Amino acid sequence: MFVRAYLRASTDEQDASRAKEDLKAFAANNGQRVASWYVENESGSTLQRPELFRLLDDCEAGDILLIEQVDRLSRLNDADWKKLRAILDTKGVLVVALDLPTSHAALQPPRSGDDFTGRMLAAINTMLLDMLAAVARKDYEDRRRRQEQGIKKAKAADVYQGRPVDTKLHTRIKDCLGSGMSLRKTAATVGCALSTVQRVAKA
């Protein structure tokens, strides 16, 4: 069993690695160590997350996907969440989240001859994981709705300016692309999301 930690933030301005020490300490307190880290700045509302799928590609049955909170893994709509859950189930990957105590048992070796307890915990964990994923999606939709209402109000008052462009970051991206560097390598070099590099490249 390998513990693979996934760290995600939605925007380039946020620190995706913020919870790294918390995850490392949590694993150690449960007698485990994090074998590999997967960090990216991508929205949790999309399945277009290269690092998440690199993690899943690296996983074998019984491996642990360790996250700080369920919303780090998913703010997906129901259809996309079911796709991701199907991949997790097919691969045999177990999700452990710090905010989901019923998932913590997956870090402990199963008790010999006690298959019933293990199955009950797995069933409860699956139900709670689905519930928290739904809550995370609702929170995402509520925040988007409030944001859109604020933008609409600002536009009506003729005071909306939009998000300022990070010109220094864009310049660094252009320099990397201009030197022949690939999109993915550029993202890793400047420390931003692949989607940001793609937007600059298109512009």
Image (spheres, rainbow, N blue to C red):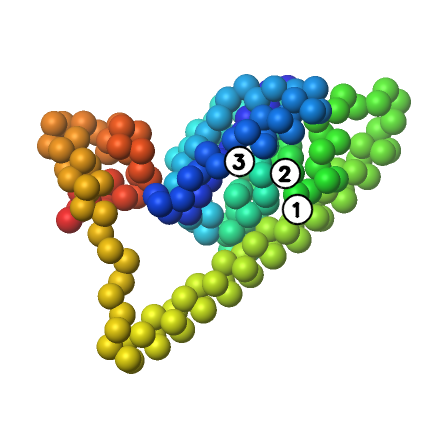
> How far is the residue under mark 3 from the one under mark 1?
20 Å
Q: Report the side of 22 relative to 7 (left or right).
A: right
Residue toward you, 68 or 96: 68
The quadrant of the rendering that contains the N terminus is top right
Query: Farthest residue toward the right?
Result: 113
Q: Is residue 60 visible?
A: no
Of residues 43 and 23, the one nearer the viewer is: 23
User: Which residue is labeled 3 in the image?
Assistant: 19
Q: Check the image and report above or below for 192 versus 140.
A: above
Residue in view at x 75 percent, y 24 percent: 108
Q: Give the labeled residue for mark 2.
A: 97
Q: Quadrant location of residue 147?
A: bottom left
User: Which secondary structure lies at badge 3?
Assistant: loop
Observer-nearest of 82 and 68: 68
Say left or right for 96 vs 194: right
Three-letter residue code for mark 3: Ala
On residue 121, the disc is none
Quarter of the figure with residue 106: top right
Label located before the other in sequence (1 or 2): 2
Residue behind mark 1? 129
Q: Earlier in the sequence, mark 2 or mark 3?
A: 3
CB-based contact (under 8 Å), mark 1 and mark 2: yes
Question: Please, what is the three-letter code of the amino acid marked with disc 1?
Answer: Leu
**Does the rendering let one see residue 195?**
yes
Q: Is residue 35 above or below residue 138?
A: above
Give the x, y percent position of residue 159.
26, 73
Q: Quadrant of residue 85?
A: top right
What is the crowding at mark 2: few (fewer than 14 residues within 10 Å), some, or many (at least 20)?
many
Whole-Å distance between the Cαs marked 2 and 3? Answer: 12 Å
Residue located 54% across and 60% down the image: 139
Residues 84 and 43: in front is 43
Residue at the outermost bottom position = 156
